[in-house]
Amino acid sequence: MSTMNQAKVEKYRNDFLKEVTANVEEGEWVKMCMQCGVCAGSCPFGPYWEHPPQEIFMMIRAGKREEVLTSTSMWMCTSCYNCIARCPRELPITHIMHGLAHYADRLGLAPKNQPTRKFANLFWNNLTKKGRANELKLGIALYFMNGFIEGIKTALKMQKMGLNMFKTKRLSPMELLGGHGIKDTGGLHAILKKAREIELANAEKFNG
Amino acid sequence: MADIIATNETILVVGGGISGMTAAIEAAECGKQVILIEKGPSVGGRVSQLYKYFPKLCHPTCGLEINLRRLKGNKNVRLLTMTEVSEVSGEAGNYSVTLKTTPRYVNENCTACGACSEVVDAEFDDAYNYGLGKRKGAYLPNKMAYPQRYVLDPQIIGTPDATKAKEACKYDAIDLEMQEESNTITVGAIIWATGWQPYDANKIQPYGYDRIANVITSVEFERLMDPHGPTGGKLLRPSDGKEAKDIAFIQCAGSRDRNYLKHCSRICCMASLKQTTYVRERYADEGKATVYYIDIRAIDRIDDFYQKVKADENVTFIKSKVARIDEDKASGNPILHGVNTEGYHRYANQHDLVVLAVGMEPSVAQDEFPVKVTINEEGFIEQDEANGAIFAAGCSADALDVNRAVQNATASALRAIQVVNRAAGMEG
């Protein structure tokens, strides 16, 4: 449990909806849901989630904080936008799902081994380093995401494809040494730092 | 038609549906001069296309007939069919209105014997049956049409069919030389009662109305039940003509949805509840109905009706907005996909036939009004001083059932009477 999580529990004690409204990106839309269920029925991954979006919205309103924030459900969203297209009240459901996932992650409540979460972190760290995705490093990191032995197995399985990509100049082994990036990496990092400051300041404002 | 007598003490009623007829009759029975115009060849409007209507579940042949009799018996009303408003100018108490009358090609001599229809070969989609059947190029708009006169479809004019029809008529009632007419009249007040149209179900993409034969609309379902309808009153489904006994009703098809119509159309819950009773009436214990809903909006005395339907074992209510419909290719059965929000149960339910309870939208598009009136974001006419003496009646004013449309029409008749009384007073 992070200290930030403790602070939020204290502040919003019995009003999880209010907490979501104030802290989750697009969270103010949750109260607009009329529980028609069209999002749950439209989701191509619907049968595999523990809680489809409309159920998550109801759980938020019912104050089931722990169950929502530790859930793997919102990490299952593939951003297909079917739910947004069909929602009769135009709720930005996809964005709310990502907002909830991000908030749970910030609080340290997100399920540790959820693969989407792991991948998101790997991708973000890879991308922000140089401003360009380093596919070789990202690929290798993904192979070893689930442990060393698993990584070796996957690497051997993908060996042929890697060689072919190398032959057709789609992959350069030189990328392992630093790799290519944008011209002004320092500028990018400054932008990201500023964005993080704004986000924290906003969160602070809600914390009042 | 040259002899339309109208003054600034005359009330013009635009639209001959249940609201327009009511407004016209009420004003006329108060001794006012009324001109009632109707775009189609017969009065009666959408109500005449219903099998039964709320709240008493009467057939239009009864409920509408009373109004027709009042209309026929009143000398103060002048009815002009196939007539539209093309221009309006002036102000309250003194409007100049240009009326455009399209030719019917049949004059007052017509006895509705039907001889012309028998000899004509050309057939067209029957708009009265929402295109579910065909009608001849010479036709009676519907069984209880008023005026009881045949019409020649303009598409047969100039073809051998037109000549055949003329030759078949023993009463010299067919006049192929009839031309479009335009008349400008003066009136004191205008009652706008152009009514509604069903929302275009093709726009609701996930429900497949445009590609699945056995998905129909609630208005089409009414026509299937009607003994005078395209199937002679049998619930035959479009794909294979088999009797449909297990029928699903989807509520809010187009209504309460920011992608389609924002407003609640009010009539659809009652219409579907009513239609579940049709299924039971037709098949007794074999008939099954399932209603998919967000919430049932049954108001005042209609709630009794809801409770009665709910108590029926063969009617199931599933709280869910259906996500999408696809088709079982072998049987032609539509399959409904969604989640029942009471317990979050995912379903894929097959039914014989799906009825979309489509919403109500104003039949005149916002930018097509021939006169400036205040229109709200749903397209209905708002009551506003800026409208002068133009008063909306029935479904031009809001999404209303027959009961409320008639009340609304009576109110607008009263408003119009006040204006023409004032006009009369000024002339002393």
Image (cartoon, coloured by chain):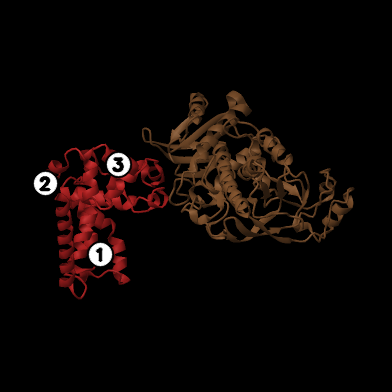
Chain colours: A red, B brown
Q: Residue furthest left?
A: A3
Q: Which residue is mark 1?
A: A135
Q: Are marks 1 and 2 in contact (CB under 8 Å)?
A: no
Whichever of labels 3 and 1 marks the residue nearer the N terminus, that label is 3
The local crowd at label 2, few if under 14, some if 14 to 19, many if 20 or more residues have their Cα within 10 Å, is: few
Left or right: residue A32 versus residue B65 is left
Would residue B243 be visible to someone looking at this image? yes
Q: Could you give the CA–CA distance between mark 1 and mark 2, rounded to whole angstroms?
A: 33 Å
User: x%, y% of residue A13?
Assistant: 16, 39
Q: Secondary structure at mark 1?
A: helix
Seen from the viewer's position, the closer of residues B380 and B71 is B71
Whichever of labels 1 and 2 marks the residue nearer the N terminus, that label is 2
| Residue mark closest to the camera, 3 vs 1 | 3
Chain letter for mark 2, please.
A
The local crowd at label 1, few if under 14, some if 14 to 19, many if 20 or more residues have their Cα within 10 Å, is: some
Q: Amino acid at mark 2?
A: Ser
Residue visible at 23% across and 59% down in the picture: A123
Q: Which mark is residue B84?
A: none
Q: Secondary structure at mark 3?
A: helix
Q: Amino acid at mark 3?
A: Ile
Residue visible at 27% across and 49% down in the picture: A27
Would residue B215 be visible to someone looking at this image? no
Q: Amino acid at mark 1?
A: Glu
Whichever of labels 3 and 2 marks the residue nearer the N terminus, that label is 2
User: x%, y% of residue B401?
Assistant: 55, 39
Q: Secondary structure at mark 2?
A: loop
Q: Residue furthest front?
A: B428
Q: Could you give the CA–CA distance between mark 3 and mark 2, rounded to whole angstroms?
A: 23 Å
Q: Which residue is mark 2?
A: A2
Chain letter for mark 1, please.
A
